[in-house]
Amino acid sequence: MPHTIAESLFRTLLDAFPASRAYPPAFFEQDPMPPLVVHYLERTLHDRLERDVAHLSTAPEGWFDEQHPDVQDAYRRLKQTLHRHARIPAGVWADTLRDAVRRVTAYLVEPVPTLTAFVFEEGDGPRSVLTILHRLDYFHAYTYLHEAVKAYVEHKGVHELERDRFAGILRHIDRQMTQDYDPDAWVVLLRPLYDLVRGVPGLEAGVPPGLLARFFAEKGQAEMQQRLEARAAERDTPVSTEALRSLLAGPPAPAAPAAPPDRPAASVRPVAAPPAAPPAAPPAAPSVAPEAGGAVPLWKRFQQQGASAASSAPPAAPPRVVPGGRPLRRLHPGGSSSRDAPAAIRHPVRPAR
């Protein structure tokens, strides 16, 4: 599907920028050319010019002093002049534009496999860090992936990366950074994709659900992937940002009835001892570490007071039993009451970018 949409966008752009002339940056930096495609084209033109200048500066050894300041200054001024007059020739414009549109579209949907294939395009052998960072600069969205690679190589002090290691770093950071996103954060992240497909006829209102399903599958968001696939099976119409927010929010979960804090659950009914039975010796109270600030929890003080009173009472006196045989408060395993139980399980704090 990314290939189909990219081809439709390419045809639209080729109509606006026909291959009948050469295109300097000032000409293809105009509407309706998407900004991310403009950036890719500029990087392509810059790198091609750098290679051509390098060939021009390669002369037969010994015929002139290449290291002389005048020669070096001439090379510098030549390079600046060539960059000012750089352009993509008419003969390669269509192929260059198609490549840019396909790469950018694929990157916005599935950034990890797209970057991996682009960086290791010439083979699966290790790539130098300089080459990797240079290739990453072709893509101007999802910059947290670029920053993650830079931080990794600086921290590890490595000078090259293999294909599998590179892909693993990207996939880990891509899923970690987005695992706690709320609907608004997802919409912001997807804005470049929405902006890109808006130039495709018929997709002005949104992104196809199948394309969004692939995006969320790459992020490890299986539930959202299934919702979008179901939406595509029901009606394969573009998903607007408002519809995407609704799908991300999902159906409201039914509220579970909460048990009263001072009563045990209905399934747990402790049996009261017969009234005439002699009181059993209370077990030794387990040691409990004070809470923050050194204070003993209120429930523990009541427990200790009750144990002390029971041990000092005359042995013949019958124990007091709450009518119905129910204790005033059920203790959770580990010695905490339902009132002292934590309200929610906190997720680990996501590391900073």
Image (tube, grey):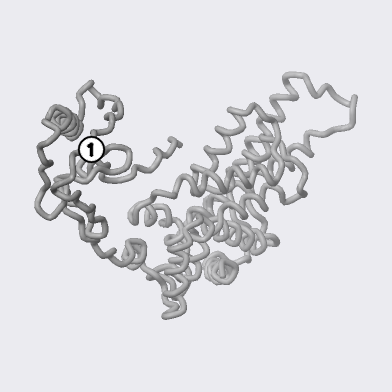
Residue 298 in view (yes/no): no
Residue 325 in view (yes/no): yes
Determine the image quadrant of residue 308.
top left
Q: Which amino acid type corresponds to the residue marked 1 in the rendered image?
A: Ala
Which residue is identified by label 1?
A: 280
Left or right of 227 on screen, residue 155: right
Q: Residue farthest to the bottom?
A: 234
- Percent of width and height locating residue 53: 73, 38
Numbered-mark total: 1
- Residue occupying image coordinates x 46% and y 79%: 233
Q: Nearer the viewer, residue 39 or 301?
A: 301
Quarter of the rendering occupied by the N terminus: bottom right
- Percent of width and height locating residue 161: 69, 38
Mark 1, Cα crowd under 10 Å, few <14 / some 14-19 / many 20+, is few
Left or right of 95 on screen, residue 349: left
- Residue occupying image coordinates x 42% and y 69%: 227
Left or right of 292 on screen, residue 208: right
Q: Nearer the viewer, residue 78 or 227?
A: 227
Above or below: residue 178 compared with residue 69: below
- Residue occupying image coordinates x 72% and y 24%: 72
Q: What element does badge 1 sit on?
A: loop
- Percent of width and height locating residue 136: 60, 44
